[in-house]
Image (tube, rainbow, N blue to C red):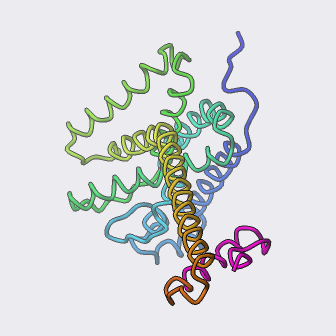
Amino acid sequence: MRFYFGGKMTPVVRALLIINGAVFLLQMLFTVVGPLRDIAAHLPGGRLETVLGLNIPHFLPWQVVTYMFLHDPSGPLPVHLLFNMLALWMLGKEVERSLRSRPFLVLYITSGIFAGLCHLALAAALKSGAPVIGASGAVFGVLVAYAVFFPDNRLWFIKARYFVPGLIAFETLMLVIGGGTGQVAHLAHIGGAGWGLLFLKGRPLLWRLKEKASRQIKTRAANDEVKVRRRVDELLDKINRQGISSLTKEEKDFLTKASRRHKRGTNGSDSFTSHL
């Protein structure tokens, strides 16, 4: 039996897998290598995760990005890392091919950042001091994107259109039952999923709003141009009837500005003042 997991490796997924693996190796070195362990002991909280993980008591701005590349180095097996990277490897490649590499990277990073901000808000409200690490928030954004692009593909024998909402509902239930406490940052998972949906569904809306705003700007500019030309024609008629000396200072200034505006629009060719 042949299993299909997204086909050929894509560049951003490959880079993310390598970076997460390399950072995890660095974490391990900081726990077992004497000199590195001594360095970690002098960090706030005595751990590398306290400085690079998402941490209210020792918050630093870069943590909203660095936390998503750290994973729990304790235990005989890196289960935390393996689950996140397995999901990224299985689902991320098809999402990257659908979005293209740069938007996919933006989706991944912004999902992780938004997930982190959601956790920070909850941790601040609950006065929780435990640092949060892991790519789960970013991976949840990818998971939602996969369900949007491939709703009928099966994840563990369940169609993605049902599996992903069910997983988010489960996370919400665990959040409510646990009251926001516990070792798993359920709100970060929900936040990453929510951002993934907003990223995909919100982009067409933003594009339509941008196009509408652009049309309105062009319409206003065209209307202004019509008004200027109409006023210029009126003043030129006045000059033909009464002479240029009949113009007021304001009218002359208007013609001068209109002429400069016309020159900018025609790269120095014909101008209104050529009629004076």
Q: Quadrant of residue 82?
A: top right
Which residue is more in the foreground, 25 or 6?
Answer: 6
For residue 249, say whether it is visible: yes
Q: Check if residue 270 falls in the magenta segment.
A: yes
Q: In this view, does 174 lie above or below 5?
A: below
Q: Name the image quarter holding the N terminus.
A: top right
Which residue is more in the foreground, 120 or 208?
Answer: 208
Principal secondary structure, stretch drawn in magenta: helix
Residue drawn at the location 48% of the way across and 50% of the way down: 112
Left-right relation of 191 to 218? left
Left-right relation of 98 to 150? right
For residue 76, say whether it is visible: no
Q: Check if residue 266 falls in the magenta segment.
A: yes
Residue drawn at the location 26% of the way across and 40% of the way down: 175
Residue drawn at the location 54% of the way across and 30% of the way down: 146
Residue 8: where, in percent of width, then height?
76, 30
Residue 186: where, in percent of width, then height?
33, 42
Number of marks in picture: 0
Which residue is more in the foreground, 73 or 135?
Answer: 135
Q: In this view, does 242 lie above or below 59?
A: below
Q: In which quarter of the image is residue 5?
A: top right
Residue 184: where, in percent of width, then height?
35, 44
Q: Name the image quarter holding the C terminus.
A: bottom right
Magenta extent: 253-276
Which residue is more in the foreground, 148 or 66?
Answer: 148
